[in-house]
Image (cartoon, rainbow, N blue to C red):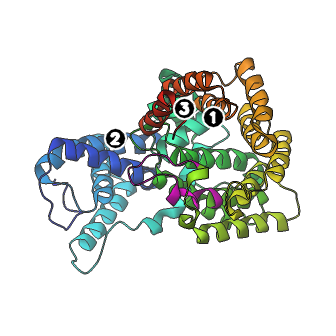
Amino acid sequence: MSDDVTDGAAARPADPESARRAVAAVWRIESARIVATLTRTVGDFALAEDLAQDALAEALAQWPASGIPSNPGAWLTAVAKRRAIDGWRRRERYDDRLAAIAHDLEREQAEATDAAGGLPYDPDAIDDDVLRLVFVSCHPVLSREARVALTLRVVGGLTTEEIARAFLTPVATVQQRIVRAKKTLGAAGVPFEVPPRSEFPERLGTVLGVLYLIFNEGHSASAGPDLMRPELSREALRLARVLAALVPREPEVHGLVALMELTAARFPARVDAAGDPVLLADQDRRRWDRSAITRGRAALARADALGRGRGAYALQAAIAEQHDVAASVDDTDWASIVALYEALGRAAPSPVVELNRAVAVSMADGPEAGLALVDELAADGRLARYHPLHGVRAELLERVGRADDARAAFAEAARLTANERERAVLLARASRPGGR
């Protein structure tokens, strides 16, 4: 059976490297939708991901000769469905699933061959499937670590290595978590559905945390040649918006949407034309997305209007709002940001929050005050391998005139980061800490 029937457009042959890059790009963007669609079809989360991986391998084998299809996501989904049919046939299980999946393929083929019919793979039609996939990945039968790792893998499309770097965890540990998580979901017979409202308080916190982690991976890529992966952030924001529509009385969902919008508003100015990072102080604020700022402030207002106080996400959104409404770094209300970080430290204490508070303190009270706080954090060792700690410390050392110490701190930050763009900038600062 041919695997090219879902794509009606002609495709040109591609060299193996182009095909490999195309497969990687498609997986990054479409993996959640592909796995979600397959999970709904075959009713087995682990089987769905295995089928998707088989389809990826088929793409690597076929695309160099046949060319990259115009709708690679639909191609991969169709190939995976055919693998499911083949598997069921081998097990002599011609049941209702076979009839249903065959019907889907016939419909998609008819749409694909209709020149005026547009794309057969409508992302908007499966939004709920992706959300179901998020909740399955965050099911209570899994540990918190397993929920996060599994969701990043199947919804965010991150590799095991990227997840490991995001959590400062060995790759083997993440691999074990994902394998065990899929086995646990299968053994527990977890349904592919959005949970009932009665279970939301238990499930929502983890879902929000996972979405924020995905957003942050897009905001600051943990590895690779690009500083950012905005498509990941957009996907996390899209899922958060869908979630906000489902649970409009949950303030933290609106708080997370606000945080994502207000942070993403600065994306257009975060890198220069060469893709190198641009510090907040050097960003052209005219390039910030004013529509996103408006949407973020509206979401924060919705969270506040529910009258249950600000949680961790709403507090972070309020901090982002202070940056977004300021005309410049000097015009920023740093005292308010310090107060917001202190509130955040009480609501969700962590050394990263303390590091960010130290930065705000340095802007409000001077670099010496901020450096003292950073040195305390460095001394306790919890962030020893967290490269932003060393980057912040280097900046503050430079501001107080300790050039040699700043050079060493920039070099340490460069050594610890896995992002190539960031490393290049930090090494440049290490060789010339007085310049940018």
Q: Residue at x 65, y 60 (%)?
A: 262
Magenta stretch, main secondary structure, is loop
> In the image, what residue occupies the spot 79% across and 41% down?
361
The question of residue 272 being in magenta is answered with yes
Mark 3 and mark 1: span between their CA atoms? 9 Å
Q: Label for residue 433?
A: 3
C-alpha gap between disc 3 and disc 2? 46 Å
Q: Residue at x 74, y 51 (%)?
A: 316
Mark 3 lies on a secondary structure that is: loop
Mark 3 or mark 2, which has the lower sequence index? 2
- Comes first in the chain, label 2 or label 1: 2
In the drawing, what numbered circle is on residue 53? Answer: 2
Q: N-terminal of the two: label 3 or label 1?
A: 1
Q: Is residue 253 visible?
A: no
On screen, residue 135 above or below 248: above
Q: Marks 2/1: CA distance?
A: 44 Å
> In front: 52, or 218?
218
Q: Residues within 10 Å of mark 3 (few under 14, many from 20)?
A: many
Q: Amino acid at mark 2?
A: Gln
Which stretch is magenta? 262-279
Q: Residue furthest bottom?
A: 116
SS for callout 2 = helix
Q: Position of residue 272 (x, y in %)?
A: 44, 53
